[in-house]
Image (tube, grey):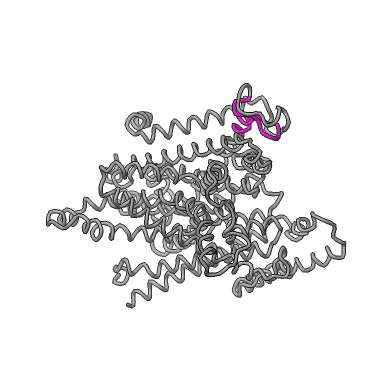
């Protein structure tokens, strides 16, 4: 595992760039643990200070330090993406593996449902959800709903691999040696799809962070939890661009773009590395 | 022909399923939450200005009826479907007494226009560039173009739209950044109005194209680079078939098939992007209408918009599915 990572770092520029970008973002997120300010307090520093010392990224009109605020925001945003990705991974793994293995009508039913979730426009539904929840809208509730809506695309991918695994000899051997379906799926098939699961995780985090940022910029989430989206929301509320407090918007946007590109590069380079077909072609090494 | 009918029937079944599941999600979301939407709406509607207690009482009555909160759970469910089937969501609360359907019909052409134009540009351009990049692997220009379009791909619609807004609103103000057309202008088929509409659509379309391009580009490039090593392409090259013809009818033609399926699959996401973009640029489509409806606490409008979105997107997917056999004749034979 470590050797693979080292080789990728040396030979795949996309992977190296992705690791670097994401590492930078993670360091900033980790710094939130040593922040001198509480992110929920306002007017702890002089407002509207341009970037400089001691407030390296300036301060907001609400009297918060942009840098430290940003470290909390990116931490929450990343945690949100990770939570959605984890829950939706479980769903897509179960559905993808079962559909691919079982085939027949089970596969048809599961894939019909799956395609439905791919097609349904999620944004209006999430807006409707906020509309009903209003002030009770929490970070965790949103993550739960998004995980329930965001598994479908990857389930289809996992199913296509599971289908080809089904026809392989070792599956037959497992059946003859008396393994049950859950056992085969977990012990035999799961290791094969793990690489795809990792790369889809990156894409899924991107997707969920993107939606979270959008929803909170519009004010459709719990805007009091500091996230990248809610930071931009508050900046917009104080008309930061018009007031010339550009650093309040520019730095969160720049950091979140770094996150997106970093995750995307990791997903793409991992895909190049795995390329399910060539990997499967090599067999049970 | 019989198999085409089976194919169509199956796709139609999928369409019905999408609408059914989508509406059920909408129903569950609106009915299974711990919050009383009636009280929420009243609080939102009466937060500005003073309203007499009698008026609030009447409002509560009509809201309970409108939300379909009367009767048993089953009756509520049936009532919900009745509204959906006839697409009648009653009068809008914020623009009382205009019916919700009127508001939606007024906004829909803007969204459909924006979506059609931007999706067409994105899909054609992305596939063309991706195909060329897959076929001419060593072209520097194409590689740099690829890097550029893929750089924008992972960034969400909202952020790209915001960046364009900042660039063309503050840094270099040459294009209109808000609205669908200039205000106080005679609306109709006259040159000034059309030009104004086009100008206002440049930034929304541009941001949708910038985000969307990378996906088609990458997909097409990898498809094409797989196809060029196929035997029949090598054979055509050895047989002296012109390069442009190989690319057009041997390579791209085959690679387009999965890309059309991809288009049907990603319509939901593209639609999300369009309504988000509309919001940023204040474009008068259903995205902006939806955001306004949420802020105004207009439940019937939000529910109506959600339902129309689900039906419209799945109908568009059905349409693509119906045209698919034209491109891939195997569907008719199989």
Q: List the single residue furthest toward the right.
A: B53
Query: Which region of the structure is painted magenta?
Result: A55-72
Which residue shows up at 61% across the image and 75% down it? Answer: B86
Q: Position of residue B192 (x, y in %)?
A: 53, 63
Quadrant in the picture for the C terminus of chain A: top left
Which residue shows up at 21% across the image and 59% down it? Answer: B245
Q: Is residue B304 above or below residue B209?
A: below
On screen, residue A185 versus residue B51, left or right, reads left
State the image quarter where residue B285 is shown: bottom right
Which residue shows up at 53% across the image and 28% down it? Answer: A27
State the image quarter where residue B304 is shown: bottom right
Quadrant in the picture for the N terminus of chain A: top left
Q: In this view, does B253 lie above or below B70?
A: above
Which of A285 and B259 lies nearest the eye of the viewer? B259
Asked whether the viewer can see residue B98, the reply is: yes
Which of B32 and A98 lies nearest the eye of the viewer? B32
Which of B314 and A107 lies nearest the eye of the viewer? B314
Dominant SS of magenta comes to loop
Residue A70 lies in the magenta stretch: yes
Q: Is residue A45 above or below residue B212?
A: above
């Amino acid at each position: 595992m470590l050797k693979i990572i080292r080789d990728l770092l040396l030979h795949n520029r996309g992977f190296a760039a992705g690791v670097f970008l994401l590492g930078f973002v993670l360091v900033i997120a980790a710094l939130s643990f040593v922040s001198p300010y509480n992110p929920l307090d306002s007017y702890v520093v002089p407002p509207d200070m341009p970037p400089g010392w001691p407030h390296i990224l300036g301060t907001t009109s609400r009297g918060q330090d942009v840098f430290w605020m940003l470290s909390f925001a990116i931490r929450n945003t990343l945690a949100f993406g990770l939570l959605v990705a984890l829950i939706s991974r479980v769903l897509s793994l179960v559905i993808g593996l079962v559909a691919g293995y079982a085939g027949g009508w089970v596969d048809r039913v599961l894939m019909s449902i799956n395609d439905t979730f791919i097609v349904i426009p999620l944004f209006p539904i999430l807006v409707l959800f906020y509309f009903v929840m209003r002030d009770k809208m929490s970070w965790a509730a949103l993550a739960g709903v998004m995980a329930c809506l965001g598994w479908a695309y990857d389930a289809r991918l996992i199913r296509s691999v599971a289908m080809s695994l089904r026809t392989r000899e070792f599956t037959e051997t497992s059946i003859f040696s008396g393994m049950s379906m859950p056992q085969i799926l977990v012990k035999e098939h799961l290791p094969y799809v793990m690489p795809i699961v990792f790369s889809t995780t990156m894409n899924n985090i991107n997707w969920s962070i993107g939606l979270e940022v959008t929803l909170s910029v519009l004010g459709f989430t719990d805007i009091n939890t500091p996230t990248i989206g809610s930071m931009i929301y508050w900046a917009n509320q104080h008309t930061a661009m018009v007031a010339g407090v550009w650093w309040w918007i520019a730095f969160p946007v720049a950091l979140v773009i770094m996150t997106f590109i970093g995750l995307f590069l990791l997903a793409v380079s991992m895909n190049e590395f795995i390329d399910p077909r060539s990997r499967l072609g090599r067999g049970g090494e | 022909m019989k198999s085409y009918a089976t194919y169509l029937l199956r796709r139609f079944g999928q369409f019905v399923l999408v609408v059914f599941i989508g509406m059920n999600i909408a129903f569950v979301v609106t009915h299974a939450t711990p919050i009383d939407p009636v009280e929420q709406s009243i609080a939102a509607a009466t937060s500005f200005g003073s309203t007499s207690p009698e008026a609030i009482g009447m409002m509560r009555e009509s809201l309970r009826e409108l939300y379909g909160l009367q009767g048993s759970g089953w009756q509520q469910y049936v009532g919900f479907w009745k509204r959906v089937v006839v697409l009648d969501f009653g009068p809008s609360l914020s623009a009382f007494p205009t019916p919700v359907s009127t508001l939606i019909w007024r906004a829909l052409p803007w969204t459909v226009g924006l979506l059609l134009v931007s999706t067409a540009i994105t899909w054609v351009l992305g596939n063309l560039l991706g195909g060329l990049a897959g076929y001419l692997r060593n072209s520097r220009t194409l590689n740099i173009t690829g890097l550029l379009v893929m750089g924008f791909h992972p960034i969400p619609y909202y952020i790209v739209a915001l960046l364009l807004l900042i660039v063309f609103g503050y840094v270099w103000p040459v294009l209109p950044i808000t609205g669908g057309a200039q205000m106080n202008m005679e609306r109709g088929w006259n040159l000034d109005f059309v030009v104004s509409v086009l100008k206002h659509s440049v930034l929304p379309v541009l941001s949708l194209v910038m985000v969307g391009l990378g996906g088609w580009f990458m997909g097409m490039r990898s498809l094409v680079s797989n196809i060029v090593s196929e035997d029949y392409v090598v054979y055509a090259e050895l047989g002296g078939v012109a390069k442009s013809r190989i690319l057009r009818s041997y390579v791209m033609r085959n690679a387009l098939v999965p890309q059309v399926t991809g288009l049907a699959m990603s319509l939901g996401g593209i639609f999300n992007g369009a309504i988000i973009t509309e919001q940023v640029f204040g474009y008068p489509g259903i995205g902006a209408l939806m955001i306004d409806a949420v802020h105004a606490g207009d439940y019937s409008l939000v529910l109506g918009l959600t339902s129309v979105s689900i039906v419209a997107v799945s109908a568009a997917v059905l349409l693509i599915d119906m045209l698919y056999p034209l491109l891939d004749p195997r569907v008719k034979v199989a």
